[in-house]
Amino acid sequence: MLLPPGRLTSVPEPDIPLRMPTKRPTSRTPRLPTAPRSIQKGLSLANLLDREAIECLAHNISLVHPAFEGKAFQHTALNGLKPLSILQRGHHLARALREHLPKRYEDAIHVLVQSLTPPLTGTEDLGLGVFFYLPHVSFVATYGLDPTDTEGHDPFEISMFAQYELTRRFSAEFSIRPFLIRWPERTLAQLIEWTKDRDPHVRRLCSEGTRPRLPWAMRIPAFIKDPRPVLPILEALKDDPDLYVRRSVANHLGDIAKDHPRLAFELCERWLEDASKERKWLLRHAVRHPAKKGVKAALRIRRLAK
């Protein structure tokens, strides 16, 4: 089992037998449900977590945990699903997983991680199929914080391990936020380590997951009040080789500018020095909204970053 580099060095071994999927016929390999490449008119995002996704979830888990009662899980998962939004469905399916996975949180995490499809190999045109993993991140966010769910053991490292693996398939930007609120110093220290990871999906999580006003997600009041603890992450990623990561840094700066425009603009001015064309794009993107409102400092940055 591959462990993420940095602070995590070990993960407790599960108490249940697990089988890692190898190259097998289609019926014996983990799969994703069919999904469109992009949002389409008249298509509800909630449909991404419907019957087919639930069947895939049961199939994938059964491959690595033969004791999993797939039919019973599907019955629980479908009960009450129809009126729910996609985010509500993620939470609903996480509760269904909790009911049918091993009771020990660590064991449940090992099952979920070993049931994952291979990591993403690109950062563009990911499509909507990755929302299949919304229940997985909801599971970590809901059950990975409370030691009473882990028999008194500290759940931090196993939860970080799960989020490292999940963000390589989807994004752990939703699930990392409760950890930033509960354990800000520990979580920021882990994310600082991950800014050096070779996987751009992991590096992006460091910026996107710490955004104070991330759309769709819970806000982080401490970072809205004072974003300075997160600035070392943005410094580390401002010249990232992947546009996928740099765009997140730009959007993060845009979030900061909503509450602390002076701090954001001063940081942009400093980054202008010896800026590459890639960093200049980042700066223009970061201040685009205040520039549209005619804010002089933002207009100046966009002019200098041409």
Image (cartoon, helix red, strand yellow):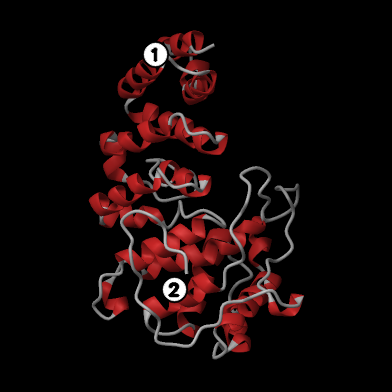
For disc 1, the marked residue is 273
Residue 260 x, y percent position in the rendering: 32, 26
Q: Is residue 217 above or below residue 243?
A: below
116 left or right of 172 in image: right
The circle on residue 109 is 2
Residue 106 rendering spot, x and y as whole percentages: 38, 76
If the image is split into quadrants, where does the C terminus sit? top right
> Nearer the observer, disc 1 or disc 2?
1
Which residue occupies the foreground of this view, 99 or 228? 228
Quadrant of res 225: top left
Q: Amino acid at mark 1?
A: Glu
| Among the two numbered marks 1 and 2 on one chain, the one whose residue lies closer to the N terminus | 2
Mark 1 and mark 2: Cα distance apart in space? 45 Å
User: Local crowd at mark 2 within 10 Å, few (<14), some, or many (≥20)?
Assistant: many
Q: In terms of secondary structure, where does tag 2 sit?
A: helix
Q: Judge left or right: residue 263 versus residue 126.
A: left
